[in-house]
Amino acid sequence: MSHHLIIQFITWFVLCYFVLLNGGYLVLNMLSLRALHRKGQEAMLDDLPRVYSGLEPPVSILVPAYNEEATIAASVRSMLQLTYSEYEVLVVNDGSKDGTLEVLKREFGLLPFPEAYRRRIATKDIRQIYRSTRFPNLRVIDKDNGGKADSLNAGINAARYPLVCGVDADSILQRDSLEKVTEPFLRDPAVVATGGTIRVANGCEVTGGFLTKVGLPRNVWALFQVVEYLRAFLFGRLGWSSVNGMLIVSGAFGVFRKETVIQAGGYRPDTIGEDMELIVRMHRLLRAQRQPYKIEFVPDPVCWTEAPEDYKTLKNQRIRWQRGLAESLNANWGLMFSRNGGVPGWLAFPFMLLFEWLGPVVELGGYVFMTWAAIAGGISWQAFATFMFVAIGLGILLSASGLLLEEMSFHMYPRGKQLLALGAVVLLENLGHRQLNTVWRLIGLWRWIAQKESTWGTMKRKGDWQAGTPKGP
């Protein structure tokens, strides 16, 4: 094969790859529009007064905490004020080295409480179980350090209720979040897991553990992530959910049937992306058993979380995300193209494999090759312009569609200046930040291949996160 033919072949391969990548996301966008339209038709029922029927399934909220003394009290208070008929809060102190346990004892009047602890999932040793003298639905488990997955497993073992909800210790739930995220379990007994929307809290005001004013961050890194989260949740996960192909429920806010999680073996402590790995494993096992089930994304229950505001922390987060994706897919090859794989095995898994797992190699390689080929005269500048339109122009369109879905459905950012700022970010995010993110993902893929040690590390947080002071405009 001649040098010219090789260049032409690679050129067409790169173009087709980017067309398929962005075309796939456009299809997900269409599916999301349909799902949101259906949701809007049902929204009129939300305006009726909420009457608790007593049929709402009781929920155990699991809060893994490691060195969270600065924020844990406000987080737990916010969870104790959720509008829900019956639930408990289980804080799992994962061997914190700071004053997390002391803060909990002081703020909530904890006393040791002897109770039977059935270890249905293997975990690190439990030191003590405490019960609050002020809030009968609050318990605290103090255990040896084993990581987030191990803490969630310990919480599942101690949970009294049939549904378990994992929430990060630094997250803020809206008061009605639990009501909305559990609705699918009432509607359909086949539902085994649901997930809600995660939004960036930077720039918002938090008072008494609740978000009181929605705003945008001044920090440019956090601002980029506002658009990223809109795109990822409002048409990424919503689109896959509409065809029962969603392969991830965010660890920051997800609800599961406890027995299904136990049957699947619980969270894996030896993986970074324990939230995605559990969902992919549940798909694989339930498909193999030919058991009817649904895993749904519910777009309107919102969990607010603080996003990284510095280059190093954001880079490390994205590297870990990519490695977690690789671990999750690699551990569950049996799902792909399996006899009873359905949408998860025949569409979602291959899509994640080609465009999310291996995507950084082709995307970054495509930018480098097409730029070199255009400069060296291997392809015409018209072909290079076509590539840039497909790679960047369609990317801008996808980001804009995420913003449009937000504005049409939820209108979280009502001020004109906020929408103008987000519109500018939609353009800028695809002209550098997206490519930088691809580099970070490539590093994560390489670290997984090289089997380099990696942990979640420390998230740098601002001191005013839950102090009730504004964090931006």
Image (cartoon, rainbow, N blue to C red):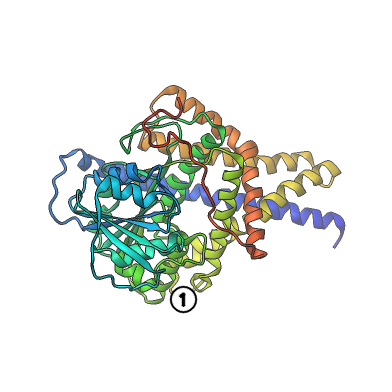
Q: Quadrant of the C terminus?
A: top left
Residue topped by disc 1: 339
How packed mark 1 is, by other alpha carbons closer than 10 Å (few <14, some 14-19, many 20 or more), is: few
Q: Measuring from the top left, give residue 76's x and y in whole percent.
A: 31, 47
Q: Position of residue 67 (x, y in %)?
A: 44, 50
As shown in the figure, which amino acid type bears the numbered disc 1? Arg
Residue 204 seen by the camera: yes
Q: Residue at x 56, y 55 (%)?
A: 320
Vertical order, 11 against 1 (above or below): above
Query: Which residue is at the front of the view, 419 or 436?
Result: 436
Screen quadrant of the N terminus: bottom right
* Residue 301 visible (yes or no): no
Q: Is residue 414 left or right of residue 86?
A: right
Direction from residue 291 to residue 273 in the image, left or right? right
Residue 422: horizontal and vertical position, in percent?
50, 31
In-front residue for pair 358/155 = 155
Q: Taking 176 as reference, is 55 left or right?
A: left
Secondary structure at numbered mark 1? loop
Residue drawn at 51 percent across, 71 percent down? 337
**Coordinates of residue 141 in the picture (x, y in percent):** 32, 60
Q: How many marks?
A: 1
Q: Is residue 393 above or below residue 237?
A: above
